[in-house]
Image (cartoon, helix red, strand yellow):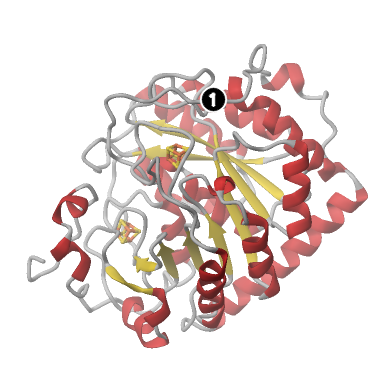
Amino acid sequence: MPGRWGILGASFLARGACGSRTRENPKETPGAPEESPEPCLASKCQDETVGKKDTLRGRWLATRRTTHELWLIGKALVSTRHVVQAHIIPIRRCNLDCAYCNEYDEVSAPVPLEEMHRRIDKLAELGTSLITISGGEPLLHPELDDIIRRIKHHGRVAGLITNGYLLVPERIERLNRAGLDHLQISVDNLKPDDVSKKSLKVLDQKLVHLAEFADFHVNINSVLGSGVNNPEDALVIAERARSLGFTSTVGIIHDGSGQLRALGPVERNVFERIMDMSKGSYSRFNHFQRNLAEGKPNDWRCRAGSRYLYICEDGLVHYCSQQRGWPGVPLARYTPADVRREFRTRKPCATHCTVSCVQQTSYIDHWRAPQHLDPLPSPRHALDREAAESLVQIETESGD
Ligand code: SF4
Ligand code: SF4
């Protein structure tokens, strides 16, 4: 049984919920894995792979994971005074160059391990239940396993979002030994194109390795929306994920200006069919995604900066990947008072927000505590106007 947090944490990497800039000249991808001879589609490959999930040990691990996560959800319901989920970036560099992504560069060094330990210790101090390592491409960090171990040392749920290119059986076994709980890969199309090289043709063998060797829960995210050439690909990817014993989610990409655009009829049909596959999972109860698909606004209270934190490679706290700079203060100085203030702070960008992981985290508190405060002025945006303009613009009443 997939853990509830698996669904919740995993959906963040609906890179559809993240990147918005369009890059003109996608680079070649050195060191890319060999492409599978042909994409291994759901019906053809259904019975060829025996996943670890089907073993007694796999079932026991899944039950233990779910029990732990249900306890953490109970804790989140009882108290609003702690962080529920954080995404943390150990390296901004990526080995790919997806056209829709604004969350990577080609040069950044890994954050030193001692600093990563300090940040994880601080997140634990703030009561964070689920810590998801993202990037850039986190598998490029040479001490990733030690980072995961630090999260598990604090008894927290450890998640990882990766493009999957560097996964081989030996690397998967190392992630098992480090104690990883959840992993998500976003597969964007069946064959690589100018927008994304994260294709089933390239990654299918990686998925087979995961089914065979991973002790942790795996979610495969596909995308729909702006810049996706063949919407039907998402359905094939979701079916393939299911046939290998994984969960699947679908993210909706916003357009180049960071705004939401309603899906067309073909995309809507694909979206509904993928949602139908998710009966019984958390996403079944997630009306946000359905509203996004229809281009409708959502009425919700974004608890970013409180129940959800995004920690960039510089160690600053941001609302989310699309609102970097608010509040934009060092994690080392973030206090329970900040968590309480942001819980009550309304986010003017909420109505058409596509960041589904924050929506899902915030859903825990949907029924309580109206928000009446405005975001504090962002110190970083005053210094870095160009970077600020690349993001979905938050607006305060004072016009900051
Ligand atoms: S693989 Fe790299 S470039 Fe592509 S979405 Fe992920 S972080 Fe961005
Ligand atoms: S509402 Fe704004 S701050 Fe909250 S997750 Fe969405 S974009 Fe980020």
Left or right of 171: which side holds 203?
A: left
Label 1 crowd bin: few (<14), some (14–19), many (20+), radius 10 Å: many
Determine the residue positioned at 60% across, 31% down: 238
Q: Quadrant of ligand 2?
A: bottom left
| Residue 66, horizontal then vertical, whole percent | 73, 62
Q: Is residue 383 left or right of residue 289?
A: left
Residue, disc 1: 199
Q: Residue furthest right?
A: 56
Tell me where residue 129 sits by quadrant.
bottom right
| Residue 64 visible somewhere in the drawing | yes
Determine which quarter of the picture holds residue 128: bottom right
Q: Position of residue 105 (x, y in %)?
A: 37, 43
* In the image, residue 150 above or below residue 107: below
Q: Nearer the viewer, residue 137 or 62?
A: 137
Residue at the farthest bottom position? 337
Going by the image, does 238 lie left or right of 300? right
Picture quarter containing residue 300? bottom left
Residue type beneath disc 1: Ser
Label 1: which secondary element: loop
Observer-nearest of 57 and 195 = 195
Number of dots carrying numbers? 1
Work out which residue is located at the far top of the displayed protein and give it.
37
Query: Who's the residue at 57% across and 64% down the image?
Result: 113
Residue 377: give x, y in percent of width and height: 17, 72
In the image, residue 198 lies at what x, y percent? 51, 29
Residue drawn at 62 percent across, 50 percent down: 281
Let me know if residue 304 appears in the view.
Answer: no
Residue under the image location 42 percent in, 64 percent down: 311
Along the line of sight, the residue nearer the viewer: 244 or 171: 171
